[in-house]
Image (tube, rainbow, N blue to C red):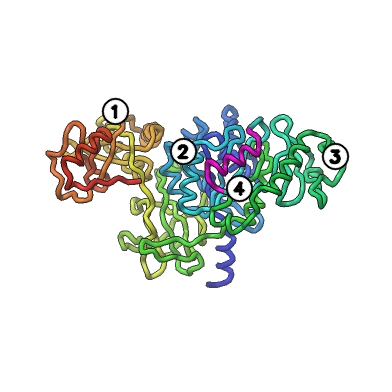
């Protein structure tokens, strides 16, 4: 591989930001983009009345609600690194989209609200990262408000998440008395709300403030120094290998809203974050990012990012080699080869044509219905397939019809396109072919209804059939329609596979006892 290409790949840092809703994930994303020069003004989620929305929230419903329900991709340069941020949905109803996004990154940044500590959704996403061995960097946010004691937060990280932690910096005070952070890693104190010229204060060889300063006389400084002494004596040692293995999380304190501690975090993160990592194929062969042949996998499909053009974009994580616009690629699933002439890179909904991209980058390919989530695209002569991406078993189900029968063409087109994005799953009854949609959470149905109306101009009627236990069948040839009943509905999924929708766990067990020869299975 030529040295220039190798250097380009090694400059890449691709990470996702994970957190519970409202922990400040979108705000910190904005600040990172601001430092990277990608935006001139970090619009916060708070600024609804001014019409100032978060750069990473592009869908209309996100702007109305102030939440992220899609995974945005943003790219910028900083300190000789090319950074790809994937801003994942924090809302639990979108865990499937988030889960797949985490398959496309090399590290994760976990945002924790200092007042609330580890919350349910953070824990869920953290477990996915641990399962994959993804390095995790923690940013404890909202220090400008009253929160839990820092030592309590560190203890919570270790006890609830079961991961060792190392405080890279430490807060001096909190809320209205927040004076700044003691930067253990860089050996300095960073002051809160001060002139740039006085931002950093030196510390001496004993770890004390090296200059006369009013901060020294405060109880907050004294407390911080006691805490740091305790951390130095009894805390974990910093170990880069453990960080890269996902066994130790470096912890940073700060306030994203006031833009404090974010730049220090970014600069330190870039020193330790992994470069693009290898991925496994279905045959358990490892593909090295520095392999010259282009390859990647599709982890997300998004319809109508540009409502004016009714387009569909397939998001590709490049795993190896170099992508060049106009190159010929093979879609491994079908064996078809085609020339890629339309390709794009992102800053939320701002896109520009990308001529070249390398391993670690995320690019968008315009899709006319060729791609599916989990597809592998390769540029070399040898086609192969990357490991399967996870699919969740839906828990909630609704019957859907168009309110206006004359719009059935738009109705079916809209459903087909939105289903391919992977947030909702499509089923139809055997003879009447009624449309049933399944989802992991209720908000997905609300987003579906909103988008059908806004993007396809179709009003839909949704009738809840409640929660069901969905099970697929290994030996479909043995299934008979007589096995169905009021508590076990037989339907087909979008790939025409049989699926039983059982009333509850009891009905599932009853069926399995009665028809022992039918082998049922579920998705994740």
Q: Is residue 323 among what the camera can see? A: no
Between 114 and 382, the one nearer to me in the picture: 114
Q: Earlier in the sequence, mark 4 or mark 1?
A: 4
Between 33 and 280, the one nearer to me in the picture: 280
Q: Are marks 1 and 2 in contact (CB under 8 Å)?
A: no
Q: Are marks 4 and 3 in contact (CB under 8 Å)?
A: no
Distance from the alpha carbon under mark 4 to that under mark 1: 48 Å
Secondary structure of the residue carrying tag 3 is loop
Q: Are marks 4 and 1 in contact (CB under 8 Å)?
A: no
Q: Earlier in the sequence, mark 4 or mark 2?
A: 2
Q: Residue at x 32, y 59 (%)?
A: 333
Q: How many marks?
A: 4
The magenta segment is 148-163
Instruction: State whether residue 466 is above or below residue 522.
Output: above
| Residue topped by disc 2 | 69
| Residue topped by disc 4 | 165
| Residue topped by disc 1 | 463
């Amino acid at each position: 591989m030529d040295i220039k290409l190798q250097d380009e790949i090694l400059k890449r840092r691709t990470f996702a930001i994970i957190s519970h809703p409202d922990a400040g994930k979108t705000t910190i994303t904005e600040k990172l983009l601001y430092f990277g020069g990608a935006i001139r003004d970090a619009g916060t989620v708070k600024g609804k009345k001014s019409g100032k929305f978060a750069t990473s929230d592009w869908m209309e419903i996100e702007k109305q609600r102030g939440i992220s329900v899609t995974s945005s991709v943003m790219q910028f340069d900083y300190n000789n690194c090319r950074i790809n941020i994937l801003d994942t949905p924090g809302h639990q109803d979108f865990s499937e989209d988030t889960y797949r996004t985490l398959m496309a990154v090399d590290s994760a940044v976990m945002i924790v609200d200092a007042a609330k500590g580890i919350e349910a959704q953070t824990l869920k996403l953290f477990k996915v990262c641990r399962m994959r061995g993804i390095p995790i960097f923690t940013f404890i946010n909202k220090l400008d408000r009253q929160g839990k004691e820092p030592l309590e937060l560190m203890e919570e990280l270790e006890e609830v998440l079961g991961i060792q932690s190392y405080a890279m910096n430490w807060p001096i005070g909190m809320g209205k008395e927040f004076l700044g952070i003691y930067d253990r890693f860089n050996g300095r104190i960073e002051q809160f709300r001060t002139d740039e010229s006085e931002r950093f204060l030196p510390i001496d060889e004993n770890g004390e403030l090296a200059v006369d300063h009013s901060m020294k006389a405060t109880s907050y400084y004294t407390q911080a120094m006691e805490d740091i002494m305790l951390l130095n004596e009894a805390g974990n040692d910093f170990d880069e290998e453990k960080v890269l293995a996902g066994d130790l999380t470096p912890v940073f304190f700060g306030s994203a809203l006031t833009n404090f501690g974010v730049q220090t975090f970014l600069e330190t993160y870039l020193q330790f974050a992994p470069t693009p990592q290898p991925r496994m194929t279905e045959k358990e062969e490892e593909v090295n990012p520095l392999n010259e042949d282009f390859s990647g996998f599709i982890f997300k499909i998004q319809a109508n990012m540009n409502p004016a053009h009714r387009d569909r974009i397939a998001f590709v994580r490049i795993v190896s080699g170099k992508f060049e616009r106009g190159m010929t690629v093979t879609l491994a699933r079908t064996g078809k080869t085609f020339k890629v002439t339309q390709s794009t890179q992102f800053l939320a909904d701002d896109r520009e044509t990308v001529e070249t991209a390398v391993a670690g980058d995320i690019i968008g390919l315009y899709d006319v219905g060729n791609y599916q989530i989990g597809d592998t695209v390769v540029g070399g002569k040898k086609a192969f397939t990357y490991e399967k991406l996870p699919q969740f078993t839906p828990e909630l189900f609704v019957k859907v019809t168009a309110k206006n029968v004359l719009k059935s063409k738009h109705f079916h087109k809209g459903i087909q396109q939105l289903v391919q994005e992977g947030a909702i799953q499509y089923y139809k009854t055997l003879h009447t072919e009624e449309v049933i949609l399944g989802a992991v959470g209720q908000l997905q149905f609300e987003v579906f209804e909103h988008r059908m109306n806004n993007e396809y101009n179709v009003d839909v009627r949704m009738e809840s059939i409640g929660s069901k236990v969905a099970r697929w069948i290994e030996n479909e040839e043995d299934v008979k329609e007589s096995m169905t009943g009021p508590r076990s509905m037989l339907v087909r999924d979008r790939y025409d596979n049989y699926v039983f929708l059982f009333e509850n766990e009891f009905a599932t067990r009853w069926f399995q006892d009665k028809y022992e020869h039918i082998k049922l299975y579920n998705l994740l």
